[in-house]
Image (spheres, grey):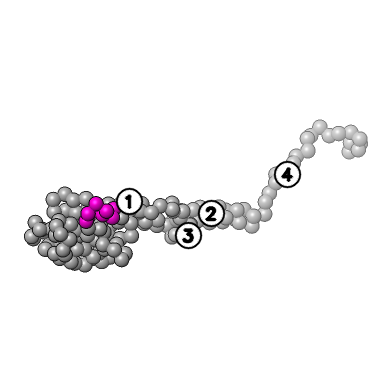
């Protein structure tokens, strides 16, 4: 005889486990796989925007004179419409816009907007032009990143 409706049975009621439809599981696995692939492949394909610092990089140009450089007192590089550094004449000489140093027959210039080709000229003690040249410079990045740029260096060997 079945137990009366008011009496409880001694066996606890079993809960059914929650089952998701098959399509929901496949969709979840697909989304995770696509997100993982995008995270790995995206930066390599340039799909993510690169943030670059707002920094102006300087470039170093090294000019080595050969041949007959003994009469050369100054070397200048064309920077825009002007030759830099300006020829030092008198007490009111204009200070150079670019940093320049000399070590024997090697001149080093710090440039902020290096051109290619680079125009150079050699001057004597009185500011007379001894020689001029225009040279292609193989600028090489020596810092920063490919995406954001960075400082560069270039070398010119000039036979007078």
Identify residue for label 2: 35
On the image, which quarter does residue 115 sit in?
bottom left
Q: Is residue 150 left or right of residue 124?
A: right
Q: Which residues are magenta?
A: 88-95
Identify residue for label 1.
143
Work out which quarter of the rendered image holds the C terminus and state it.
bottom left
Query: For mark 4, what is the residue?
Result: 16
Instruction: Give the residue drawn at x 21%, y 56%.
Output: 89
**Percent coordinates x, y for residue 21 in the rendering:** 67, 54
First in sequence: mark 1 vs mark 4: 4
Question: Can you tell which of label 3 and label 4 is closer to the viewer?
Answer: 3
Tell me which secondary structure the magenta stretch mostly adopts: loop
Residue at 24% in and 61% down: 77
The answer for how far apart the CA atoms under marks 1 and 3 are is 23 Å
Q: Position of residue 130 (x, y in %)?
A: 13, 64
Which comes before the other along the chain, label 2 or label 3? Answer: 2
Q: Residues within 10 Å of mark 2 (few under 14, many from 20)?
A: few
């Amino acid at each position: 005889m079945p137990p009366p409706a008011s009496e409880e049975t001694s066996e606890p009621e079993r809960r059914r486990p929650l089952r998701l439809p098959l399509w929901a599981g496949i969709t979840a696995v697909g989304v995770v796989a696509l997100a993982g692939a995008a995270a790995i492949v995206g930066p390599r394909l340039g799909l993510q925007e690169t943030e670059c610092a707002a920094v102006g990089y300087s470039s170093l140009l090294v000019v080595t004179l050969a041949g007959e450089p003994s009469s050369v007192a100054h070397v200048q590089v064309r920077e825009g419409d002007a030759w830099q550094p300006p020829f030092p004449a008198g007490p009111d000489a204009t200070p150079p816009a670019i940093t320049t140093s000399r070590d024997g027959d090697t001149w080093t210039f710090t440039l902020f907007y290096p051109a290619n080709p680079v125009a150079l000229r050699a001057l004597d003690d009185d500011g007379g032009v001894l020689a001029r040249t225009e040279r292609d410079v193989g600028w090489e990045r020596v810092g920063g990143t490919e995406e954001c740029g960075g400082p560069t260096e270039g070398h010119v060997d000039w036979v007078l």
